[in-house]
Amino acid sequence: MQSVIQGILRPLLESFRDLAPIIVVIAVFQLLILQEPIPNLGRILTGTVLVVLGLTLFVRGLELGLFPIGENMAFAFARKGSVFWLLAFAFALGFGTTVAEPALIAVAKEAAEVAAVGGMIADTASAREDYAFGLRLTVAISVGAAILVGVLRILMGWPIQYLIIGGYLAVVVMTGFAPEEIVGIAYDSGGVTTSTITVPLVTALGVGLASSIKGRNPMVDGFGLIAFASLTPMVFVMAYGMVI
Amino acid sequence: MELLHLIWETTLGTVRDVLPIAAIIFGFQLVVIRRPIPRLKETLLGFAYVLVGLALFLIGLEQALFPLGKMMAHQLTDPAFIYEGVERTAEAMHWWDYKWVYLFAAAIGFATTVAEPSLIAVAIKAREVSGGAIGVWGLRTAVAVGVAVGIALGTFRIVTGTPLHYYIIAGYIVVIAQTVFAPRMIVALAYDSGGVTTSTVTVPLVTALGLGLAQTVPGRSALLDGFGLIAFASLFPIITVLGYAQLSEWRARRSNPTGE
């Protein structure tokens, strides 16, 4: 009985500790600096309880579901030995998880507005929709390509810094040529592509691959897939802005 | 009752977001790998935990933290608060007038990053892979400090109206220089930590702060200047994580000067 309580209580406490900084920051600013009361205290308390519960379940689910499946896929592909199917899977995973990402849909819509105001596209509803959809597709393809290249890097053992620094140089060069309005959106799009479910899956895939291939170190070679997924959208979105 | 309805709706929403991922995984498993998934029941249970957990997490945020955080972002950027009733013209605006905004940006950036679920996932994995050498809290604190610095600097940029790409390019140069000197095993993880900081918790609050600032600072357009905070939040953690590794290496070397 005691171990059951501990098994439930400890993770809950840990989640609460994760959230404590937010609560402190909001309370301090609201009460001391803005000097206003906290509105709807009851609703805020329920909300906080839900957040703590949700985070606890999520972390448990990570260890039970997302990490094992990512690793198992990596082992299975390594055993099968088909590079083609592994790369196809990598691209599909990157593309599929990004194209429907709600954060990306929101950013694409805002970007279409910026483009319409900036005179890059006609200021009509259909032109904006086309632009936003094209942008979403561009970002999804760029993330697919990123995971593909990232997996290829793990297979070949290429050092990550050359690829990433090369990507940075591409971003810097393209910043000089891309329309000014798109630059801010492009820089931000790198951050919004990697969702909470994609990150653990992709991380487990990379680490699993690096640990099942001889001569690869999971620490040095296993990480880095997310880095590619946040870099390529910047390049592709600026290219999209230059082409349209 | 309303809450239950909301939980149901949000869970359906997260299920819809996860469907493409599940379809790809199970599709490849069935067609290409053609092997049963080991411990299928447990894995599915884990997926269910993730879905329900994420839904509860999002609802809780919507109920509690987002409205308050967004409201505060608005109040802090409101000229009425900044000038405290003192008559000031737009010309006399000084970047230091927004000091509370920078402090709030740094504090909220730090706090939301600590609670970011994808960062927790990567930190757990990093500890596992490094055999405990990289602690969950060490990594998360390093990343959170990076986000705090990044977002504070990002709000400063919006207030002063300096071009975004100068900051980003300067940040890249720092990252490249650090990469040369940092321990090799941290490099990939550090690059990754840039991408994981900005998801469910940080993005909505930070976006509200950026838009609020761009709307109230004279001479800024919400559409053109509101962007860029996410870029700051994804660049600076790379610098702090590399710095954290360099610092630990330096300290280890100092306490053990013979080298081995």
Image: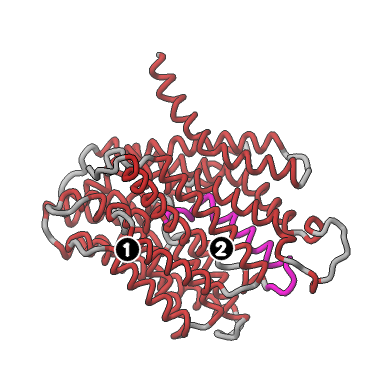
Residue B208 is inside the magenta segment = yes
Q: Secondary structure at mark 1?
A: helix
Above or below residue B40? Residue B168 is: below
- Figure quadrant of residue A134: bottom left
Q: Quadrant of the N terminus of chain B?
A: top right
Residue B180: numbered disc: 1
Residue span colored magenta: B194-220
Location of mark 2 (residue) = B229
Of mark 2 and mark 1, the one earlier in the sequence is 1
How far apart are labels 2 and 1 at the CA level? 27 Å
Q: Secondary structure at mark 2?
A: helix
Residue at figure coordinates x 59%, y 86% from the top left: A119
Residue at figure coordinates x 64%, y 34% from the top left: A45
Residue A55: numbered disc: none
Image coords of residue B125 (percent x, y): 32, 44
Number of dots carrying numbers: 2
Between B260 and B120, the one lying in front of the other is B260
**Label 1, residues with CA under 10 Å away: few <14, some 14-19, many ≥20:** few
Between B150 and A108, the one lying in front of the other is B150
